Image: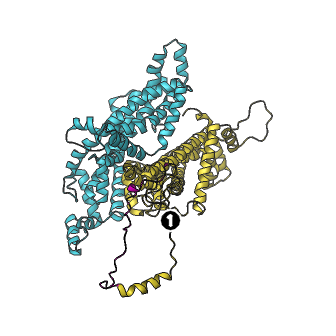
Amino acid sequence: MKPPAAPIRGSGVGPDLSSRPETLTTDNMAAYLIRRLWQMIPTLIGVVLLVFFLFKYFGGDPAEILGGLNATPQQIDAIREQLGLNKPVWQQLLIYFRSIVTLDWGHSWATNEAVSNIFATRAPATLTVMLPILLLDTLLALPIAMWVAYRRGSLADRSIMVIATVALSVSFLVYIIVGQYLFGFQLGWFPVQGWSDSTWTNLVTYVPLPVLLALLVGIAPQTRLYRTFFLDELGHDYVRTARAKGMTERTVLFKHVLRNAMIPILTNIGLALPGVFIGSFLIEVFFSIPGLGREIILAVNRSDYPVIQAVTVYLAILTMVVNLAVDILYKLVDPRVVLK
Amino acid sequence: MSAVLSTPGVAPRQSEGVWHAAWKRLRGDRVGMSSLVVVLAFAALVLLGATGLLARDWQKEVGVPNAPPLFMGPAPAAEQSAIPVPKGPNVDISAVDPLAPRYKEWDERAAKFKAVETVKRETLPFGGDRLGRDVLTKAMKGTQTSVFVGLMAAVAATLVGTLLGALAGFFGGKVGDFLEWLYSVFTAVPDILLILAFAALFGRGIGSVATILALVGWTGLYRQVRAEFLKHSVREYVRSAEAIGASAVSRMFRHILPNISHVILVRMSLLVVGFIKFEVILSYLGLGVGVDDVSWGTMLAEAQSELILGYWWQLVAATAFMAVFVTAFSLFADALRDALDPKLRGLE
């Protein structure tokens, strides 16, 4: 769980810290940004090649899937011709690269819907479910974690640890199956599944049940993780010094410990961010939420290359940008971090 | 990491090995030891199942469909939805039945085969599924599949991650750059997409699931092993080994690897739990184990529709087995980490 960034705490008493307080000039920041963005290109090319060849050679044949069961060989050939599947491989690859550069992904082979339109309509649904989950997870887990870390070894602390272990031991599937049955079917508190066009209706009617279930399964382990980060900081000398100076516990906890623990916490949130955009496909499948996660599964089942390729490239870029953003955030949170 | 744990002042003697010290620490950990017992019991279950001594005939339809558990008593007749046997005498229609002349011949032929009348049981120890298979036997067989897949996948992912991590950390340079590139590519593609693509490539089955999970899950371990190799490759003992002519392979796997094996072991035990949960989801989606196999995931997939009809036992059986195993294994993994890496003790 250590952040992958430059040494942060290990060199806490190193000479370079006091003598040369690394200033964040716009110049070296720009250089850093350019270098990092430049490094993304080979990774992106790798992602493109991996996905292209994986689906090209091992996925289903899109022409046969589109043709259906009764298609004649001539029809399938015609589809292949139309989709450009009979062109040489390098030409198909070139088309893929061209669509990345021009950001024009064309239309879905299965539904003829514009890929950009698929994104525009599916992403909001995913965000409507996933953002509340991430937000509530973090906002609830942080204070609990701080509290149990502070009261380490107490009954509350130990109970949280036990609950975390047990909550994590059961598959999320079970939570969904039982939750839908109990809260939706038996008690009738929430609709079992569904979705509407209005964001507000979604938020108050359809989103609460999946969010509740995701929190049930996610909050205890999250607390446990954050607790580790806080404990790590509470053991440091600066905490003892702060207390010896006569600072209130509140100042120690919120001004000193919290700020130092922010680095691993931010990493953790950053790592979770790309997942927010894919959406938990399990949630989307079970609650029939028309989001991106469900769309990915549909696209793979139909060998719908334009959609698969667009999703992959977007998510890869997103992951890398988020990683970069997290690294820059380190710098803002902890000036000792040297960006290199 | 192979630090000697001797107290100063005591006369120098044979120092305690890291494994021995870890075992001593583990033995003192009550939670760790009891979870180890549970894990070993499950391991015995898996072994017995694999050798065919236990739950071999889980596919036998021993009970009536959806037979309730023993303690609930048989289901009322109306719920069994059996077609009532018509009463009254049979009407003789042999005059108009075109098949009538051949009945005798068929009866004779049928008599050559031995037919066994099986009585389907009204209740089963922990209920039956849709086909009347014993849920308890099924859960044991499912445990065997799920645990086996989790372990195999974790071992495979560990092998891949360790090998690549060792190469990247030890050699660095071009090899390291290439492996770092590979790592960033694999982490930039969403897991679900990789899994779906690999699932199309390998098809269904126990081996395929393990392979798929290993191919997707090696990255975290790679990162950690690489970091450890980076750290260790410049240490004095490795330099000394080089000075006396130890080859690169020998330095990597005979000198450094034993010194970081506890890190790998702890990481691997965490992978097992993650992979078991992933197998459940894959099998649920129909990408997991084959149709002739049963795992916790396939049981849950069946349980969803059963639950609405009120047949809750399959869900409970699969969940209970999974919860007990995963809890015990996680606790054991924690204890293992505490024992092998005392610096981290009590942090988590």
The chain under label 1 reads B
Within 10 Å of disc 1 (Cα), the crowding (few <14, some 14-19, many 20+) is few
The figure's colour scheme reads by chain
- Determine the image quadrant of residue A48: bottom left
Residue in front for this viewpoint, B18 or B137: B137
Q: Viewer-proximal residue, B16 or A171?
A: A171
Main SS category, magenta section = loop
* Of the pair A102 and A276, the residue shown nearer to us: A276
Left or right side of A57 for A112: left
Quarter the C terminus of chain A occupies:
top left
Image spot of residue B101 (x, y percent) = 37, 88
Query: Which residue was labeled with disc 1?
Result: B119
Which chain wears cyan?
A
Residue B56 appears left or right of A285: right
Specify whether residue B290 is painted magenta: no
Q: Which residues are magenta?
A: B72-99
In the image, taking residue B82 as reference, residue B141 lies left or right, namely right
Instruction: Tell me the shade of chain B.
Output: yellow
Seen in the image, is B69 located left or right of residue A296? Answer: right
- Please determine whether, in this image, residue A67 is positioned above or below residue A97: below
Question: Circle 1 — which element?
Answer: loop
Q: Image quarter for residue B35?
A: top right
The image shows residue A296, relative to residue B92, as above or below, that is above
Query: Where's residue A103, x and y in %?
Result: 22, 50
